[in-house]
Image: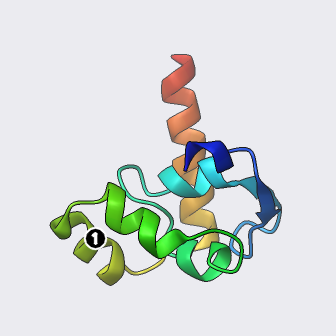
């Protein structure tokens, strides 16, 4: 699936264009809760998730409530700061 990492769509949660790579890691160790809804028309997401996630992680993914826009933005900023050593 990494071959799709640069594919972009408009994110309904963030309100901007984002790549599939972002969606794959939006919740840290899990994909964004909306990944299936957003990407299924374009990519075989269910098969991909079954392939890459353990049964326990797949269950966590399916039952995790989606985060709001502001929580996602703050977590992304914190993650970027951590990567840059700020």
Any part of residue 1 in sight: yes
Quarter-of-image position of residue 10: bottom right
Q: Which residue is at a point 38% across and 58% down the rendered structure image?
A: 30
What is the total number of numbered labels drawn onto the structure image? 1
Identify the residue at horizontal 47%, vertical 77% (top origin).
Answer: 66
Left or right position of 80 against 6: left
Closer to the camera, 49 or 60?
49
Mark 1, secondary structure of its residue: helix
Residue sitting at the far left:
56
- What residue does disc 1 label? 58
In the rendered view, would you say 33 is above or below 20? below
Question: Splitting the image into 4 quarters, where does residue 42 fall?
Answer: bottom right
Along the viewing direction, whichever of 60 and 75 lies nearer the viewer: 60
Q: Is residue 23 left or right of residue 31?
A: right
Q: Quadrant of residue 36?
A: bottom right
Q: Position of residue 34 (x, y in %)?
A: 55, 76
Left or right: 28 as drawn, with respect to 42: left
User: Residue drawn 51% across and 65% down?
Assistant: 32
Q: What residue sits 56% from the left and 60% below the top?
A: 72
> Depth check: 47 or 55 in front?
47
Residue placed most toward the observer, 12 or 3? 3
Residue 2 place in picture, x, y as percent: 57, 43
Whether 23 is drawn above or below 5: the answer is below
């Amino acid at each position: 699936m990494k071959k799709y990492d640069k594919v972009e769509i408009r994110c309904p949660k963030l309100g901007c264009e984002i790549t599939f790579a972002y969606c794959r890691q939006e919740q840290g160790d899990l994909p964004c809760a909306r990944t299936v809804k957003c990407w299924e028309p374009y990519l075989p997401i269910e098969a991909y998730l079954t392939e890459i996630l353990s049964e326990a992680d797949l269950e966590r993914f399916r039952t995790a409530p989606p985060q709001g826009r502001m929580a996602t933005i703050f977590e992304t900023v914190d993650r970027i700061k951590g990567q840059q050593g700020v």
